[in-house]
């Protein structure tokens, strides 16, 4: 199944959870595209030890997830 996730929040927790969810869907064999809109375009803003967005985004990209901004 092809899945599109639309992310438009600047909140680090929401961005982290959205990318984690995309990674879960990829492990389930789905085709996932994540569209970054508005304040979410700066995906790595808010990256921290609590919310490791960059680590999850790297895993997403290496797992053939597609990021579109």
Image: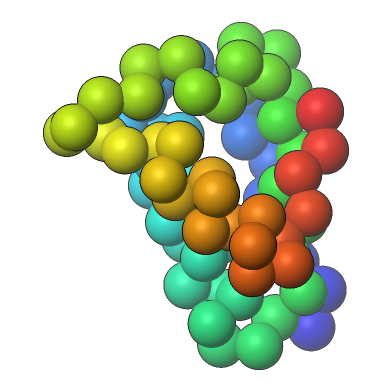
Given residues 16 and 64, the one toward you in this image is: 64
In the rendered view of the protein, which quadrant contains the C terminus? top right
Q: Position of residue 65 (x, y in %)?
A: 71, 61
Task: Give the residue furthest to the bottom.
Answer: 29
Given residues 18 and 61, the one toward you in this image is: 61
17 left or right, relative to 5: left
Residue 20 sits in which quadrant?
A: bottom left
Number of dots carrying numbers = 0
**In the picture shown, does residue 69 fall above or below 35?**
above
Q: How is the image coloured?
A: rainbow
Q: Position of residue 22 (x, y in %)?
A: 56, 61
Picture residue at 35% right of the left edge, 24% below the top: 47
Residue 16 sits in which quadrant?
A: top left
Q: Position of residue 8 (x, y in %)?
A: 62, 25
Given residues 64 and 21, the one toward you in this image is: 64
53 left or right, relative to 66: left
Picture residue at 18% right of the left edge, 32% below the top: 49
Picture residue at 45% right of the left edge, 36% below the top: 54
In the rendered view of the protein, which quadrant contains the N terminus? bottom right
Residue 13 sits in which quadrant?
A: top left
Given residues 28 and 57, the one toward you in this image is: 57
Q: Position of residue 64 (x, y in %)?
A: 74, 67
Task: Give the residue furthest to the left.
Answer: 50
């Amino acid at each position: 199944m092809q899945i599109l996730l639309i992310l438009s929040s600047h909140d680090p927790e929401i961005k982290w959870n959205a990318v984690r969810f995309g990674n879960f869907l990829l492990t389930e064999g789905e085709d996932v595209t994540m569209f970054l809109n508005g304040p979410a375009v700066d995906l790595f803003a808010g990256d921290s030890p609590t919310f490791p967005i960059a680590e999850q985004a790297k895993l997403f990209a290496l797992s053939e997830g597609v990021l579109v901004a």
